Image (cartoon, grey):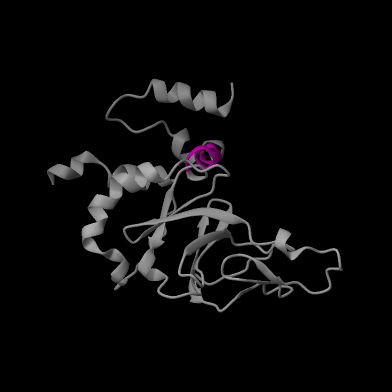
Amino acid sequence: MTVRDEMLAKLQRRRPGFSLEQSFYSDPAYHQLDLETIWYRDWLFMGHDCELPKPGSYMTVQVGAYPVLIVRDGTKTVRAFHNACRHRGSRICSAAKGTAAKLVCPYHQWTYELDGRLLFARDMGTDFKAADFGLQPVHCETVGGYIFINLSDAAPDFAPVRAMVEPYLAPHTLGETKVAFEMTIVEKGNWKLTWENNRECYHCAG
């Protein structure tokens, strides 16, 4: 029986109103399947449009095994890339947030435009084609001041998400706001523990 089959069998016998079985929270194989079937395939909220106020503003995030760089380019378009140089895989930007005129790898100074195009790579030979070695893009969309990314090679259509959330977000003009306070909480536990407790309907009565 595969991990997927085992997981489905346990889901089918789940008792409504009760937690999932322990393996859903503690088994590394289950967590890997979560990453592959949910986190690496679905649209994920990553931040706010106002966090990238000008061309060159960037933020970095980590989704499972993938470091991602989100940047506003010279045309003010928000783009996302795998945060790895195409030469030796070194991380391009290590800070959580910052600004940069160009995206420069700290290892061998390969230099990329804000739209991901490779501009400079020394000593690569006359047959080297820079156009073939731009940063690897990640699907990126913005709506109502929110930034979403999708790590899948073939991302699902974002239009249904946009149609659903835009009417709620548009009146607040979140793109014209700023982040006044930010706090990071690191929880040493499976993501489902946080999700389920946050969405627990017992809290509604409180």
Q: Is residue 48 above or below residue 22?
A: below
Residue at point 74% right, 73% down? 108
Q: Is residue 85 above or below residue 95?
A: above
Residue at point 24% right, 51% down? 167
Residue 101 on image: x %, y %: 56, 79
- Is 157 within the magenta? no
Number of on-image labels: 0
* Of residues 59 and 143, the one drawn nearer to the viewer in this rendering: 143
| Residues rendered magenta in the picture | 31-38
* Of residues 64 and 160, the one drawn nearer to the viewer in this rendering: 160
Indicate the quadrant containing the N terminus: top left, top right, bottom left or bottom right: top right
Residue 40 on image: x %, y %: 52, 44
Residue at point 58% right, 44% down? 153
Horizontal side of 181 relative to 101 (left or right) equals left
User: Image quarter for residue 20?
Assistant: top left
* Of residues 185 and 45, the one drawn nearer to the viewer in this rendering: 45
